[in-house]
Amino acid sequence: MGKEKLHINIVVIGHVDSGKSTTTGHLIYKCGGIDKRTIEKFEKEAAEMGKGSFKYAWVLDKLKAERERGITIDISLWKFETSKYYVTIIDAPGHRDFIKNMITGTSQADCAVLIVAAGIGEFEAGISKNGQTREHALLAYTLGVKQLIVGVNKMDSTEPNYSQKRYEEIVKEVSTYIKKIGYNPDTVAFVPISGWNGDNMLEASPNMTWFKGWKITRKDGSVSGTTLLEALDAIQPPSRPTDKPLRLPLQDVYKIGALPGDNVGFNVKNVSVKDIRRGNVAGDSKNDPPQEAASFTAQVIILNHPGQISAGYAPVLDCHTAHIACKFAELKEKIDRRSGKKLEDNPKSLKSGDAAIVDMIPGKPMCVESFSEYPPLGKGRILIWI
């Protein structure tokens, strides 16, 4: 077996509308973290709401409130693999109103990916004193995220498109700022990208042949590459304190519910696993709790039975999750299988094609209910192997 990949956490930060969620969603899609059918579904939903450019962002913006507003409110967690790492990617909100959630996401990260928009006016808005580019970068450093990658996004929106001059202007200004807050620009990979079109995400872009790649220099040597994915693989794995006592910060406490039709799991207190089994039925002890049936009356239709069925016959009945032998105690009446009209009282036997009302007695404790009240607990089938 090959060596198991290391797990790293990455937070994607930057000014609102810099393209963080789109870039992250596209990266997850390209790395196989989500399938093409789901992307096509998101594209259709986004177009119906007049936000066609949000299809990749919706990979992460799962909450309805976020979709309707078109922004990332809470942090979103997704996973994908690179050639070197298992990556959990945290998409942090860019809006100042949600800065608390951004701090929560950033505090969990091993590396930050700062997305800055290269579009006219967009970079300037983000890097201004009122923009979130500065604040997010400062928060990342303050919260102990010492590794940084800068994605210069929306290179397809510069004038002219994919402008080398614009990219170099942005690299110069961002380098000056991150140096002030504590990062060494020599250890930071700057990658010109288009999160929407995929330029320089996984493969070198033919639209930016002028870009000769990024290079970072650390104490242990230099690393170089061209794409954002290669920059992620160049992250230095953090040391994990596996020998220390457990500390587990809680992010949220959920009180969840379920509706009819949902498949659920739940915990049961003060009951031994020996006392419960498949076929049991749970209910509210204070509101008409389910009961064991000593006997029950059933309407049956005999299908493909090789012989005749008489009182005393005891096949296995499958009802809800129960699988229990039940005896035909009494054949009460034969009925028309379509209209339900009585055809015969107390028939001596039933054959294939007959419908009847019968009394049945379970061989073991069993819960059944009236079909009109609880349909899933009031229908079943008997399988007879010939």
Image (spheres, rainbow, N blue to C red):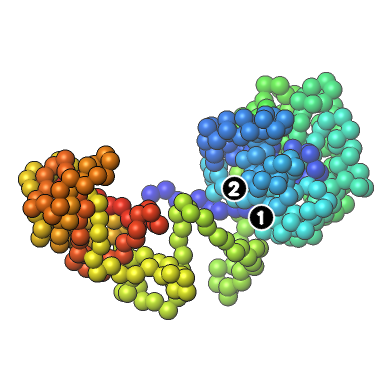
Residue 154's label in the rendered image is: none
Q: Amino acid at mark 2?
A: Trp
Q: Earlier in the sequence, mark 1 or mark 2?
A: 2
Q: Is residue 271 above or below residue 180?
A: below
Left or right: where 356 falls relative to 196: left
Residue 222 visible? The answer is no
Instruction: In the displayed orientation, state which residue is furthest to the right.
Output: 129
- The residue where tag 1 is placed is 110
Front one among 144 and 271: 271
- Viewer-proximal residue, 22 or 113? 22
- Left or right: 81 with respect to 281? right
Residue 76 or residue 121, whichever sits in front: 76
Q: Secondary structure at mark 2?
A: strand
Question: Where does residue 321 sit, x and y in percent of width and height?
Answer: 31, 57
Q: Position of residue 187 (x, y in %)?
A: 74, 47
Q: Quadrant of residue 127?
A: top right
For label 2, the residue is 78
In this rendering, would 325 be left or right of 2?
Answer: left
